[in-house]
Amino acid sequence: MSVYENFDEQKQFACRVIADHARTTAFSIADGILPGNEGRSYVLRKIMRRAIYHGREHLGFNDSFFYKVCDFVVDQMKDAY
């Protein structure tokens, strides 16, 4: 059984949010959208902040982690994109 399967429902939800938002972040940046203060750049910024919030609040991550998840996404999806 995986670590994910041992998590309660709230932690599993947090993992899914982080995974989805890491994919969105990686593909958005690949398309030239960078986090910012206006328009779609602000939307990306909010997406990133939400993922980081779930990691800190529900999974107890205190150090930077989101860039590692995004790097993993890039590594896994580089051939498809």
Image: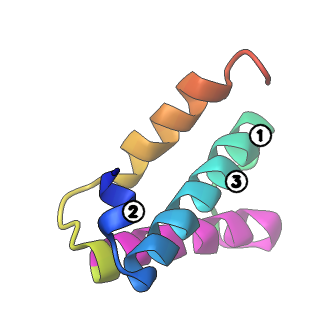
Task: Give above or below for 73 relative to 38.
Answer: above
Mark 3–mark 2 Cα distance, whole angstroms, equals 24 Å
Task: Give above or below for 4 relative to 25.
Answer: below
Density class for disc 3 (Cα within 10 Å; few <14, some 14-19, many ≥20) is some
- Which residue lies at the image location 62% right of the left edge and 69% below the top edge? 47
Q: How is the image coloured?
A: rainbow
Mark 3–mark 1 Cα distance, whole angstroms, equals 12 Å
Amino acid type indicated by mark 2: Glu
Q: Which residue is mark 3?
A: 24
Residue 64 circle label: none
Density class for disc 2 (Cα within 10 Å; few <14, some 14-19, many ≥20) is few
Which secondary structure lies at badge 2? helix
Question: If the image is split into quadrants, where does the C terminus sit?
Answer: top right
Tell me whether circle 3 and circle 1 mark residues in contact (CB < 8 Å): no
**Can the viewer see residue 49 in this picture?**
no
In screen coordinates, is 5 left or right of 6? right
**On the image, which quarter does residue 37 sit in?**
bottom right
Front of the two marks 3 and 2 = 2
Q: Which residue is mark 2?
A: 5
Out of 42 and 74, give the one closest to the viewer. Answer: 74
Density class for disc 1 (Cα within 10 Å; few <14, some 14-19, many ≥20) is few
Find the magenta span and give its range.
37-56
Q: Position of residue 61 (x, y in %)?
A: 23, 66
Q: Which residue is mark 1?
A: 32
Amino acid type indicated by mark 1: Gly
